Image (cartoon, rainbow, N blue to C red):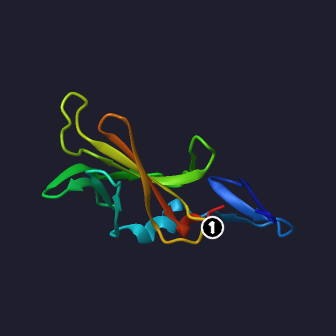
Amino acid sequence: REGVVCNPCGQGLYKEVIGEGACDPIPAMATYIGSLDGTCYSYATGGEWSYQVCFGNELSQFKEGETISLGSFTSDSGEDVLLDATNVPYAYQAFTGGTNCGDPGDRSGTVRIKCETEGGPSGLASISEDVICVYILEFYTSLICDHP
């Protein structure tokens, strides 16, 4: 961002507005996504299963008459902002201890929370299962777009 430098200025991450010389703490990512806690979003893949995340609570997979837990909320990215394989920044919430999946163990999932730059509504946009019974969901929202 023009006019703002993010640098270590004491402990933790701080931002300095160029020309002002003051170091203000960069708010933790949780400050930006905290309003998501307690809200639920569903995603239909077009296939047999649909998915639902209730931030700060539960991640699940469902179809008519059947619901499978993908885990309960266990952690989030805290102050960290991570980069995906294409260098897009994201925060996350992790869910573990879901319904047993046999040999691999319990189901689990991570919801990656990314900036919605198109001006659309917040929502789940994709799901992948690169490792059996371990799910990654992409969630887009404008809430984190202002994080430095």
Residue drawn 16% across the image and 58% down it: 64
Quadrant of the rendering where the N terminus is positioned? bottom right
**Image position, residue 86 (x, y; %):** 62, 43
Label 1 neighbourhood size at 10 Å, few (<14), some (14-19), many (20+)?
few
Identify which residue is drawn at 64% across, 55% down: 13
Indicate the position of residue 120 as horizontal and vertical percent values: 53, 71
Name the foreground residue: 15 vs 99. 99
In the picture as drawn, the residue positioned furthest to the left comes out as: 65
* Residue at far front of view: 46
Number of numbered discs visible in the structure rendering: 1
**Looking at the picture, does residue 52 appear above or below residue 127?**
below
Which residue sits at x=48%, y=62%?
30
Query: Going by the image, does 77 lie left or right of 68?
Result: right
Label 1: which secondary element: loop
Nearer-the-camera pick, 46 or 42: 46
Q: Residue at x 26, y 41 (%)?
A: 107
Q: Quadrant of residue 119?
A: bottom right
Q: Would you place residue 97 above or below residue 138 in this image?
A: above
27 vs 90: above or below: below
Q: Which residue is mark 1?
A: 146
What is the x, y in percent for residue 31? 51, 67
Query: What residue type is disc 1 on?
Result: Asp
Q: Nearer the viewer, residue 70 or 49?
A: 49
Extreme residue toward the right, this view: 19
Apparent side of residue 122 relative to residue 15 in the rendered image (left or right): left
In the picture, the quarter occupied by the C terminus is bottom right
